[in-house]
Image: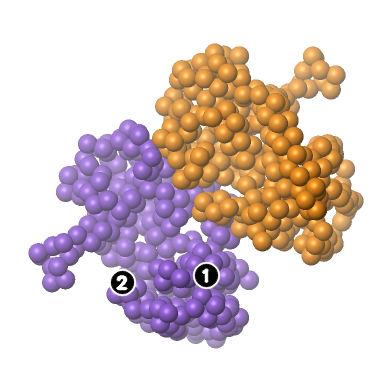
Chain colours: A purple, B orange
Amino acid sequence: MQLIDGKLVSAQVKQEIAAEVADLIAKGGKKPHLAAILVGHDGGSEAYVAGKVKDCEDCGFTSTLIRFDDDVTEEALLAEVEKLNNNKDVDGFIVQLPLPKHISEQKVTEAIDYRKDVDGFHPVNVGRVSLGLPAFVSATPDGILELIKRYKIETAGKHVVVIGRSNIVGKPVANLLMQKAYPGNATVTVVHSYSTDIKEQCLSADIIICALGRPGFLKADMVKDGVVVIDVGTTRVPSTETKSGFRLKGDVDFDNVAPKCSFITPVPGGVGLMTRVSLMKNTLLAGKKEIYK
Amino acid sequence: MQLIDGKLVSAQVKQEIAAEVADLIAKGGKKPHLAAILVGHDGGSEAYVAGKVKDCEDCGFTSTLIRFDDDVTEEALLAEVEKLNNNKDVDGFIVQLPLPKHISEQKVTEAIDYRKDVDGFHPVNVGRVSLGLPAFVSATPDGILELIKRYKIETAGKHVVVIGRSNIVGKPVANLLMQKAYPGNATVTVVHSYSTDIKEQCLSADIIICALGRPGFLKADMVKDGVVVIDVGTTRVPSTETKSGFRLKGDVDFDNVAPKCSFITPVPGGVGLMTRVSLMKNTLLAGKKEIYK
């Protein structure tokens, strides 16, 4: 069993990005510029955005943080989105989700110019991923594919089972892994809450991507020997062993599943860290205008 | 075994559309207006477009056919697309594919205003289908779902195997059938040319959607008793029994597979006819501004 080390790979990717940015600047180019809009003071969102700002520093990007109180109107937020769409210095930007209930997340997401949509949530990017066209791939699916690539895990002709059909993980990762590409060319099955055959599907899987958000869901008797397991779950569970009083738990019963695996991602230290660098990868692509002119 | 009668259902749907249009007009509304751009004189494309014009008549729509010779420049074609985008009387329009090689089909497809993209090929519509949002669903997947609905075939918790991963059938129908909806909520597997487990997957399938374009590919020993088979294949094969010298053959070895099925679509007379009415459905939706304002 080999542990997939998200910490190591994400640090590597970050270093590679920083080196490329240094090179860009040496050649007279401009620093990629990521802007983030943060509404309100939700602890989770604050932490995520702070992490993104720090990642920008590490990568040599310019970052701009725009804050609104949580009573901001949808109109004012949309006006800011429009400003960023038109701001030539900003290569890409994100609106940190969730938003307060009086604001439509879908409306805001669709208002972002897809050419600056480094979160990859705009329908144009989602559609282009499904069509097999260059696009900003959203962070978690991109992070999963990056791990598969770095560990040279074969996907062609393999049976991939994706557990969970969310718009930000399950569906896009399934769409990616069925493309004519590497990673890709896999037989892909998506199972979810309505599925009656999750165990059978998992038992036939060469690769399982577990993204349903139920701690310890995937048990040892659900996987075959030699399986690759990618655990996307990050549920906070109470813990007496940490200062914060909680710890992150994945969707996989790690202690019992890991011995049967050829590769497995830990939680924490697996996919989670990769999602952060995927945003940086997209920002670099945006800065270089590699996806859209 | 019950034969799914695409001829009957498509005629029904057309009648329903015509009745709704009559009602719209009685209430002072406007006829839905479909425009089609046809480049060159390819026999297949001519026939398809003629069929669409006739369907418009049957449904009570206005139709406009715009022709270009096959030496039209990409620029001129894009200018026409832009004109139709801005023409307030045109509710929806299509550019008949394939286009001559000197014109980028992708560029033309993406130039169409997604709010008039009744073919459902624009990335916004593809993305919105994947996201589970209202969208113009492309004709073949929509036709398949309509047949499933009309025959009240259960999909929730069923294992659907889609053979083929094309952008116009395999991928969108897979994306649709995994949504939280009816038809939908299915465990969905997509297999294709790289898959090594097509037979095993098919043997476990409750519903098989065969869309790879290889005549007679799905054999009786690949399906279980009681399976639902949707045959999307329409390959022209030589025939001494028809005036034209060819006949359409599906992807399913019909004679041997049908006895094992609970439901099966014939070729011809199955999915093919449904794709035509799906374009009419989308045009009506466009006319009523039901998907986009």
Residue drawn 72% across and 47% down?
B284
Q: Position of residue B174 (x, y in %)?
A: 52, 41
Confirm whether residue A66 shows in the render: yes
The front one of A117 and B197 is A117
Q: Position of residue B186 (x, y in %)?
A: 45, 38
Q: Which residue position holds label 1?
A: A108
The secondary structure type at the circle numbered 1 is helix
Q: Which residue position holds label 2?
A: A44
The front one of B17 and A236 is B17
User: Would you identify the image quadrant in which residue A144 lies?
Assistant: bottom left
Confirm whether residue A84 shows in the render: no
User: Would you identify the image quadrant in which residue A200 lies?
Assistant: top left
Q: Chain of mark 1?
A: A
Q: Chain of mark 2?
A: A
The front one of B51 and A277 is B51
A291 relative position to B17: left or right: left
**Both labels 2 and 1 in a single chain:** yes
Mark 2–mark 1 Cα distance, whole angstroms, equals: 20 Å
Residue B30 vs A30, above or below: the answer is: above
